[in-house]
Amino acid sequence: MILQALKEYYDRKASDPESGIAPEGWEWKEIPFIIVLEQSGKLKQIEDTREGDGKKKRGKLFLVPQGVKKTSGIAANLLWDTGVYVFGSVNTEGFDDDKVLKATTRAPEQKKAFIKRIKDSLPETARIKAILSFLSSVEQASLEKMPAWEEIYQINPVVSFRFEGEKDLFCRCSEIRAMIDPENSEKTSDGICLVSGMTDRISELHTSIKGVYGAQTSGANIVSFNLASFRSFGKEQGANAPIGESAMFAYTTALNTLLSRESEQRLQVGDASAVFWSARKTNFESDFAFFFKEPEKDDPDVGTLKIKNLLEAPKTGAYLGDSGDERFYLLGLSPNAARISIRFWQVGTVAEFAARLRQHFEDLRIVKPPKEPEFYSLWRLLVNIATQDKSENIPPNVAGDFMRSILDGTPYPQTLLQSALRRIHSDVEYRVKPVRAALIKAYINRYSRTHPKNGEKELEMALDTEQPSVGYQLGRLFAVLEKIQEEASPGLNATIRERYYGSACSSPVTVFGTLMRLKNHHLPKLDNKGRAVNLEKLVGEIVSHFDDFPAHLDLNEQGRFAIGYYHQRQDFFTKKN
């Protein structure tokens, strides 16, 4: 199903001449340096295609013949490869003696393989002869005259060829393009492709998938059989899961395109790299990333606008005119040694995913200070429950599980509530931030909707004095007692929040007696006696909702405690009519 959906996405993009997706037999490759030759094969110059500064320099992307799958052996690409394959020169700085010997012995063999690949694959036209002449006769002295040579020698970048006076790389000229299809017709056995259902040459080795966060930079595979223990019935490599060359090219090209640096259809969700697409082009596909990512610095309002469009969609019947019945796909990937594992795979319609996203944002609605963002991104929600509010401390599986629950319309994972409460207990300065309160409220309400037998009332956006939850009312009480202390002793460096919040939230009976006695000590200090009376009445109103201080609160009630505390604090700062 996954590979079929990816192949269909490739077919969709390939049918659009403006999509820019690589045609079969080709791939987009970053080529930092181009060897410019005269028609005779003499070196004219080495062109630097890179743009940017320092480490951010990036070479331009060019369409080149699809590369071979690199292993520990020697295998050359056609008319493009790394500098060591093209020039036979290798930088051994920092190598020990064994590595120096191995690299210097291997480099000439790599160059021979590059030349042999050209000779075996292409007829000896005048320009092929010119390239072969350059490769066999170029002198080190002429290379060293080129300004770019020292950097090429040091970093071993990918290089290719262009003839003087021409715009395109030589590998894109008509004579080469006409030969690519026969070049790709390698000797493999015929069979039925599991993806297309058609007879095709079965792919032995699948193209590597690149761009998955944490995976090997050289790429990894979803489909591979590199050990005998993985094989069945004596079959070798790809014959164990027969996928035709065309389908293999389509799904790997589609996935590499979705994962590319330039792609707007990918998200990093914790340690999972997520990609998404629809069966046909939709606005929902184009805007999906905005529902999860942080606002863009150069246009911070664009994400807010997209979410508002989403929330308005029920009134118009579809998301910005999209067909609600269009199929939509979400694929989450994570690294696993030399392979890529499927973290999550979700399929539905645009209408289904849009409805679940709307519910997510509705669940997060909560009263908040004026300067808070109107909507919270997935990253902001997660980083505020991570240790020290640092993204590197987000638990590895939480992000993927959270996103999956949003798009499944199911309760959030319990680890979210646990992490939020743990962070509130450790963050003695801020405790219940608006973003944490929004997440806890959303968690509890989604849980309550799927467990109606518990009879729990959902939490409101703002203060709810009739909320029957003891935890919620205790949170309100704690906020009132803190307010009394603040007004009785203005300018305190620390309040009961710093010292008592953790115990009050988890084991109320152990501290609320002390806090009530402190309240009796603080109230007489208030200059405004009417204010003191009103605060005492508020304490009485809250206490009337329960009989005794409970010994313990479970996790959900601790969450309700946090919301009661937050709601009551916000109510103190809300102007009354």
Image (cartoon, rainbow, N blue to C red):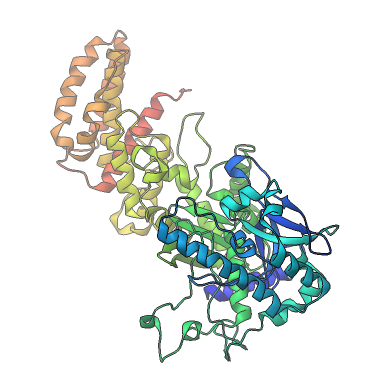
Viewer-side residue, 23 vs 205:
205
- Reply above or below: 562 against 401: above
| Left or right position of 463 against 289 | left
Where residue 183 sits: x, y (%)?
69, 80
Total labels: the figure holds: 0
| Left or right position of 503 against 236 | left
Where residue 429 sits: x, y (%)?
32, 28
Residue found farthest to the top: 527
Residue at the image position 32 percent from the left and 53 percent from the top: 414
Residue found farthest to the right: 165
Residue at the image position 48 percent from the left and 56 percent from the top: 213
- Reply above or below: 392 against 219: above
Where residue 100 sits: x, y (%)?
46, 59
Viewer-side residue, 97 vs 548:
97
Q: Is residue 309 visible?
A: no
Residue at the image position 60 percent from the left and 45 percent from the top: 308
